């Protein structure tokens, strides 16, 4: 139960005073008188913050013996209001700090572009959009992990995902999913991205170069295969049991995943489709063409372009 003093002051905006000749002194009821007696004060001024009583100022009798004049009470009211304003600003600043801290925590688990939209109160509309999709996977991951300590694997994967995420972010892409040693990223959603094909190919090049500097504790270097495809996709939130998951679905996503697998057959670091090659300009000028490649799970053969691994000889396989 709240104190009677708090209850009485919470309902007031003006100071409470026992002085005769003032409004509160002339009309003081028993509850107000009890407040002053309990505090041993002549004047009490409430200080409000965020719509409730936050504090109060107490003044005893003047040493001169004079009463508190209306001018005194006006000045005290202004002081209390100034204090109230300061408390409101402090509360607002703290709320802003907490919101920003929550947003930063959210960014650890949600793609940056998605987190920015959510923080700004913008809706994540589900829509069909042309995007470039990138899949990357560590080559020979199972063999590399054989005999390695779990903490070594965990450390290497941490460095790998950090490097991939940094490359994607640097070129304006959005990480959609981490799955074991695989990563999926999209360029052109949720925000449009000019030259998305070139951005995706440049990202793939950066990833291939950067990940090569990472190794397990036994000294075995990491190598990746990257697949990139461009086309229409459905981007938006998919509802799970306890959350919304922002993702991209469609033919371009499936093709990019298949192209990533195709890097092993072609002895390539990166494989892209013809739509990506057409929009990437000089970024894919040194990619080798492979016409009419049959791809597992797809009825129609695809013209693809590959950036060979150093020292490899690329052949055109039929992958079913």
Image (spheres, rainbow, N blue to C red):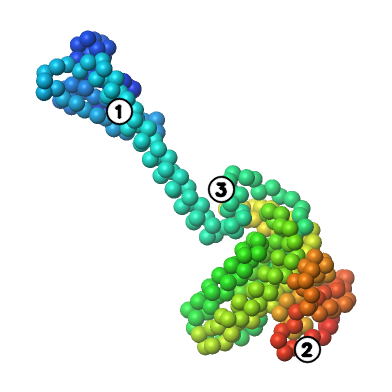
Mark 3 sits on what residue? 119
* Sequence-first tag of 3 and 2: 3
Towards the viewer: 183 or 180:
183
Mark 3 crowdedness (10 Å alpha carbons): few <14, some 14-19, many ≥20: few
SS at circle 3: helix
| Vertical relation: 42 (above or below) 112 | above
Seen in the image, is 274 located left or right of residue 15? right
Mark 1 sits on what residue? 79
SS at circle 2: loop
The residue lying at 75 percent from left, 71 percent from top is 283
**Residue 258 position in % (x across, y down):** 76, 72
The residue lying at 33 percent from left, 22 percent from top is 13
Towards the viewer: 291 or 307:
307
Mark 2 sits on what residue? 313
Seen in the image, is 311 located left or right of residue 94? right
| Vertical relation: 173 (above or below) 62 | below
Q: CA distance from mark 2 to mark 1?
A: 83 Å
Image quadrant holding the C terminus, namely bottom right
């Amino acid at each position: 139960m709240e104190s009677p003093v708090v209850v009485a002051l919470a309902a007031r905006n003006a100071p409470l005073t026992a002085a005769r000749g003032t409004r509160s002194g002339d009309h003081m009821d028993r509850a107000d008188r009890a407040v002053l007696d309990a505090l041993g004060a002549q004047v009490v001024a409430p200080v409000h913050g965020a719509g409730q009583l936050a504090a109060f100022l107490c003044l005893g009798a003047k040493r001169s013996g004079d009463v508190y004049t209306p001018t005194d009470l006006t000045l005290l009211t202004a002081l209390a209001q100034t204090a109230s304003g300061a408390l409101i600003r402090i509360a607002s600043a703290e709320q802003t700090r907490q919101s920003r801290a929550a947003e930063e925590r959210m960014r650890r688990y949600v793609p940056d572009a998605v987190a920015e939209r959510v923080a700004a109160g913008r809706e994540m509309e589900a829509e069909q959009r042309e995007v470039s999709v990138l899949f990357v996977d560590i080559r020979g991951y199972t063999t590399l992990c054989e005999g390695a300590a779990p903490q070594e694997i965990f450390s290497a994967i941490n460095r790998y995902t950090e490097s991939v995420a940094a490359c994607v972010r640097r070129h304006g892409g959005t990480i959609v999913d981490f799955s074991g040693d695989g990563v999926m990223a999209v360029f052109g959603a949720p925000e449009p991205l000019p030259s998305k094909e070139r951005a995706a190919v440049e990202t793939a090049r950066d990833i291939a170069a950067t990940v090569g500097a990472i190794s397990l504790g036994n000294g075995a270097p990491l190598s990746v295969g990257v697949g990139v495809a461009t086309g229409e996709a459905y981007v938006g939130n998919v509802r799970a049991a306890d959350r919304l998951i922002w993702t991209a679905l469609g033919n371009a996503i499936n093709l990019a995943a298949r192209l990533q697998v195709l890097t092993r057959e072609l002895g390539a670091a990166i494989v892209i489709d013809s739509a990506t090659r057409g929009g990437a300009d000089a970024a894919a000028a040194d990619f080798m063409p492979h016409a009419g490649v049959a791809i597992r799970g797809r009825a129609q053969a695809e013209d693809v372009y590959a950036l060979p691994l150093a020292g490899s000889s690329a052949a055109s396989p039929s992958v079913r």
